Amino acid sequence: MRALSHFREFTREEIEFVAKFKTGELAADAGATILVEGAHSAHLYTVLSGWGFRYKALEDGRRQILNYVMPGDLIGLQGTIMGEMQHSVEALSPISLCVFERDKMMTLYGNHPSLAFDITWMAAQEERMLDEHLLSIGRRTAIERSAYLIAFLFQRARQLKLFNGHSAIPITQQHVADTLGLSIVHTNKTLKKLAKQGLIRWQERTCEVLDGDALAEVAGWEGLDERRRPFL
């Protein structure tokens, strides 16, 4: 990931600390639960490869997908600060994670203020994304919501060079419905409209983006900024 222009450069001292901070790597299959709401985890993770999503669930099983995680994203920080996780994280695709010991976080804050600022930046960026998602759910029409979500995922994945040959996002229509707060029937009808316009193509458990710029235009969304971002 350090080779990607999307991420900032590290100093030698930062790299040495992160190498010691890291305790290993974890691989999980698609559908695996990585973190569980209400649990106390001894670890936090950086996504190295693959896709996942954060969600909260009601007692009857209905869920709200809050956001999606991709390489460079830090997960489990909430458990470090709050004592327990306030949401769950599930793998959308096979995923690999860098594992950090939660108990060593204070060393990072005390000895490496630049990395501490990076964590603050990532938390603020997550808040910014959630603001946009909430605006979408609250004020965009169904077709605008759908176009925004797919354009958002497409632009993030493109920045991270996750596409090989064609722009396929590993989500189902149920994932879209659970993110946008729509019924699966309404979601299906809405996505068919985008497909008829030649903007997307649905395949088995994937959504192929045919025109990401047009999707952003339908949503009335200016798109992601191109600034370099940190990761651990």
Image (cartoon, rainbow, N blue to C red):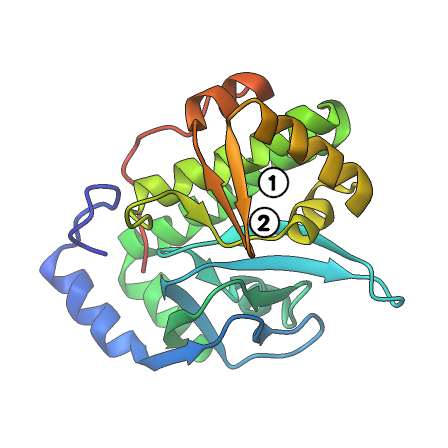
In the picture, residue 78 is in which quadrant?
A: bottom right
User: Taking 106 as reference, is 191 above or below it?
Assistant: above
Give neighbour class at mark 1: few <14, some 14-19, many 20+ (Cα, 10 Å): some
Please report whichever mark, 1 or 2, sits nearer to the chain's N-terminal start. Answer: 2
Can residue 220 be seen in the rendering of this structure?
Answer: no
User: Residue, x 49% and y 36% (percent of image)?
Assistant: 152
> Label 2 sits on what residue type?
Asn
Give the residue type that dot 1 points to. Answer: Leu
- Tag of residue 223: none
x, y percentage for residue 10?
17, 54
Give coordinates of residue 141: x percent, y percent. Answer: 74, 23
Rendered image: mark on residue 67: 2
Corner quadrant of residue 47: bottom left
In terms of image quadrants, where is residue 37?
bottom right
| Side of 154 relative to 195 (left or right) | left
Which residue corresponds to the image point at 88% horizontal and 68% vertical from the top-left? 59
Of tags 1 and 2, which is closer to the observer? 2
Label 2 element class: strand
Question: Which residue is identified by label 1?
Answer: 130
As measured in the structure, the alpha-carbon distance from the residue carrying label 1 to the one carrying label 2 is 7 Å
Considering the image in quadrants, where does the C terminus appear? bottom left
Location of the N terminus (image quadrant): bottom left
Query: Could you tell me which residue is drawn at 71 percent across and 31 percent down?
Result: 190
Which residue is more in the foreground, 65 or 116?
65
Q: In percent of the image, x 14 and y 63: which residue is there?
A: 13
